[in-house]
Amino acid sequence: MKLLTHWKIFHKTLVYFVLSLPLIAQDGEVISLTKHIGHTLDAEENLYYKVFTDIPNFNNAQFYQVEPNRIVVRISFIQYTKSKISKRAFSLKKFTDLQIKLNKLPQITDKIRDSFRDNLTYLRTKEVLENITTGQFVSVKTRSNKWVKGTLLSFKKNTLQLQTPFSIKKIPITQMERINYREKIINRPNWKIYFYGIAAFMGFTLMETWNHQTSPEWTVKWHNRFSGAIFGLVAGSEVYDTSMILLSKKTQFALTPEELDKLKP
């Protein structure tokens, strides 16, 4: 019985080891691309040096020497906030030619990096969606080329929830192409008195018109006037909040390279 148990453990360990051998051999030793780039080519460097121009939503790349004349590059790219991996093989000559080409180019600066970040929105998609202020009116373009508009309720588990006039819509991040929203809601406290005052006056006036049409008793008249003013104050709060949202600058955020190209001036 013990012999059988030991054999099962040995067999399982041997299987795991054999399966891991191709992975170990495939990765090899990570090597530096150039002195100023180092071991990892990041998104800004790739955009500047134009190494992998055919990889959409490029994140980073690392080069591994698996054989004396064979280099394998692991390319990480972002697909709807999820990191995906692609691999390519280079001969030593092709890799050396790439190094020579990159060493001839001026080194990327911090200023250039900052200017490129506007074109790398896909690297911060989840962060952007999590930080959108809830309660505001947003519009979302889906992969089916339809726009869904409504009040933003939440963004949880990579899903956006919108309150539309008829129902609550749940839009997974994998179905989104673009979202229009207000990045920052302006606040004008000194405007509140005007919004509240005008709304209260309109409520009072509306009930006064009702009093003239129905000619109720004196006490009922004042009750109606008071109710109208209170209703106006409550409505004024909602009108103020809505006005602050509508007056705030609208931001358009693209989740795909195609939509990002459309937003470029």
Image (cartoon, rainbow, N blue to C red):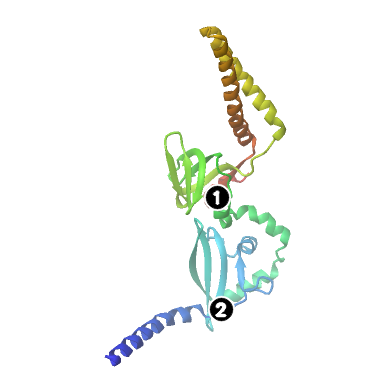
Amino acid bearing label 1 = Leu
Callout 2 environment at 10 Å: few (<14), some (14 to 19), or many (20+)?
Answer: some
Q: Quadrant of the N terminus?
A: bottom left
Q: At 57% from the left edge and 66% from the top edge, which residue is drawn?
A: 60
Q: Is any part of residue 237 visible from this angle?
A: yes
Callout 1 environment at 10 Å: few (<14), some (14 to 19), or many (20+)?
Answer: some
Q: At 51% from the left edge and 57% from the top edge, which residue is drawn?
A: 81
- Between the C-alphas of marks 1 and 2, the distance is 43 Å
For residue 92, which numbered disc appears in the image? 2
Q: Position of residue 216 (x, y in %)?
A: 52, 9
Of the residues tagged 1 and 2, which is closer to the observer? 1
Q: At 64% from the left edge and 64% from the top edge, which residue is drawn?
A: 45
Per the image, label 1 sits on a secondary structure element best described as helix
Q: At 46% from the left edge and 37% from the top edge, which residue is drawn?
A: 164
Q: Is residue 209 above or below residue 258?
A: above
Q: Is any part of residue 206 visible from this angle?
A: no
Per the image, label 2 sits on a secondary structure element best described as helix
Q: How many numbered badges does the structure rendering display?
A: 2
For residue 129, which numbered disc appears in the image? 1
Q: Is residue 227 above or below residue 5?
A: above
Q: Is residue 66 above or below residue 216?
A: below
